[in-house]
């Protein structure tokens, strides 16, 4: 067994265990990846304990990427110039420090065809990720590279830093890289730069991956500017860490498989009205320690009661509101998303949800739906039982076609949540 883990101050939302264990399954290696929270004064003892416990190494995250350096015997050239370590290998000859974020970002840029050579590159922030981007841009032969800081006068002396006001005045930026936490979940509407700056960019990269589309990337997309989030970087830096710990070369196809696995971290529940999506969804979210949202509730929060939307504006307008809610929900991570029964009629909504989620059809048998469904407040079921039967005939095959997993909800909600949990485990193997 290869033992590895992550050291940081607060690690509750880390995706690293799933990511590394998936690499392990792909490689046929038994990788056990565990999370270790510590305060600064516990750092040295934690490293000693993990080393003594036979760990191959650890990843290091906020706020210890610089703090760990004095505890290491050797630094890789990247870690040396960046001044930060995100991967430690416990070697008999001493602990070695590496910065695999460098490889992760390089791989992300290559995958998206964003060349830095000969370009003007602006990097937002002056922390570990920004320094990584800065030295990568220099190594790649950027014509001009600078970081952007709220207090450029306080930035490290080995990097060029300018103010956000100076960035605003610049005529053009070839590649903009956000290496600040601005826009990260849950502060999803925050954007680190103004529209004026975004309009001047040739390409925009956000190192953030939760949400999948930050406010910055949404704006770039709306302007037709090529853009990418940080999820591939996360997967590629993990690949490089695995190589350091196991000595096994991993392929970019394996990186793509892990990326796909992590990207589809939501669970999307589809099915007839009355099939139990909301109840099962809440139970499932609780059981799996995930967030829960309901696209109908999102529509109502934004536009008022659904029966009123149908009465005043018609179904087409409701479907547009539902599409907006689906796109927003698809931007979340590790969330159970319950949807309205008719969402399968909007291909764009299903496409957005499938991009980031595994689709589960909760199939409540028609006879149960007929005997149990409360049709009040459901405009499309105003015709009562015959309307339910007609909708079921129309939609059942669509639900089946979109589903990655089908769970027959023949008993109670808790049994259905249990069935989905088992099927998910099987599906994700
Ligand atoms: P960090 O060392 O704390 O640095 C963040 C920098 O952002 C700071 O130096 C600061 O620069 C700027 N900043 C902080 N708060 C700000 C605010 N309220 N407004 C404007 N600027 C602010 O963090 P880090 O490790 O570099 O991580 C930065 C980001 O990169 C995070 O979002 C992280 O998720 C992401 N990251 C992603 C990956 C990946 O694999 N995708 C890997 C590493 C990091 P100034 O004080 O100079 O303005």
Image (cartoon, rainbow, N blue to C red):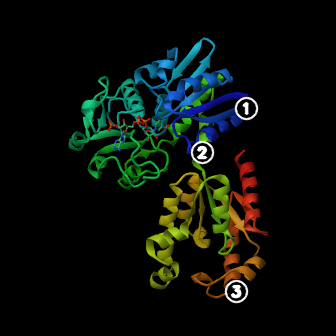
On whether ligand 1 comes within 8 Å of the CB at mark 3, the answer is no
The residue lying furthest to the front in this view is 41
In this rendering, which labeled residue sits more in front, label 1 or label 3?
1
Viewer-closest of 273 and 50: 50
Q: Which label's residue is closer to the chain start, 3 or 2? A: 2
Residue at 46% x, 22% y is: 79
Provide residue 260's location: percent of width, then percent of height.
60, 45
Considering the numbered disc 3 on the image, is that residue within a helix, a strand or a loop?
helix
- Mark number displayed over residue 30: 1
Residue at 46% x, 51% y is: 213
Query: Quadrant of the image for the N terminus?
Result: top right
Left or right: where does residue 41 sit relative to residue 89? left
Q: Which label's residue is closer to the chain start, 1 or 2? A: 1
Q: Name the residue tied to disc 3.
A: 386
- Mark number displayed over residue 189: none
Considering the numbered disc 1 on the image, is that residue within a helix, a strand or a loop?
loop
In this rendering, which labeled residue sits more in front, label 3 or label 2?
2
Residue at 63% x, 13% y is: 92
Left or right: where does residue 427 sit relative to residue 123? right
Left or right: where does residue 225 sit relative to residue 110? left
Query: Quadrant of the image for the C terminus?
Result: top right
State the CA–CA distance, disc 3 to disc 2.
42 Å
Pointers 1 and 3 in contact (C-beta within 8 Å): no
């Amino acid at each position: 067994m290869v033992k590895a883990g992550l050291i940081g101050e607060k690690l509750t939302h880390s995706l690293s265990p799933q990511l590394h264990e998936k690499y392990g399954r792909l490689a046929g290696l038994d990788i056990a990846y565990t999370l270790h929270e510590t305060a600064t004064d516990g750092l040295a003892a934690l490293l000693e304990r993990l080393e003594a416990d036979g760990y191959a190494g650890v990843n290091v995250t906020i706020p210890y990427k610089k703090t760990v350096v004095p505890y290491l015997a050797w630094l890789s050239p990247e870690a040396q110039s960046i001044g930060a370590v995100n991967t430690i290998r416990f070697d008999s000859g001493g602990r070695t420090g590496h910065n695999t974020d460098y490889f992760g970002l390089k791989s992300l840029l290559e995958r998206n065809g964003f060349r830095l050579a000969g370009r003007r590159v602006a990097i937002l922030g002056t922390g570990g990720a920004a320094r990584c981007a800065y030295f990568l841009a220099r190594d790649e032969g950027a014509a001009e590279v600078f970081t952007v800081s709220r207090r450029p006068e306080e930035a490290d002396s080995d990097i060029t830093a300018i103010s956000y006001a100076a960035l605003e005045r610049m005529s053009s930026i070839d590649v903009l890289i956000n290496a600040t936490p601005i826009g990260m979940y849950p502060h999803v509407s925050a954007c680190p730069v103004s529209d004026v700056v975004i309009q001047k960019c040739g390409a925009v990269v956000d190192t953030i991956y939760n949400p999948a589309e930050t406010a910055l990337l949404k704006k770039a997309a709306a302007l037709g500017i090529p853009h990418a989030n940080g999820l591939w970087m996360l997967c590629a830096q993990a690949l490089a860490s695995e190589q350091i710990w196991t000595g096994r070369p991993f392929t970019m196809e394996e990186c793509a498989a892990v990326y796909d696995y992590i990207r589809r971290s939501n669970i999307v529940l589809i099915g007839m009205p009355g099939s139990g999506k909301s109840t099962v969804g809440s139970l499932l979210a609780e059981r799996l320690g995930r967030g829960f949202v309901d696209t109908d509730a999102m529509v109502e929060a934004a536009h008022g009661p659904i029966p009123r939307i149908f009465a005043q504006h018609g179904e087409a307008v409701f479907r547009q509101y539902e599409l907006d809610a689906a796109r927003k929900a698809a931007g979340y991570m590790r969330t159970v998303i319950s949807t309205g029964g008719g969402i399968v009629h909007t291909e764009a909504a299903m496409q957005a949800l499938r991009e980031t989620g595994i689709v589960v059809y909760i199939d409540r048998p028609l006879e149960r739906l007929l005997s149990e469904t409360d049709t009040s407040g459901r405009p499309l079921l105003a015709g009562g039982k015959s309307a339910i039967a007609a909708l079921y005939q129309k939609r059942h095959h669509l639900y089946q076609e979109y589903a990655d997993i089908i769970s027959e909800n023949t008993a109670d909600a808790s049994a259905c949540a249990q069935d989905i949990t088992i099927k998910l485990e099987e599906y994700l193997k």
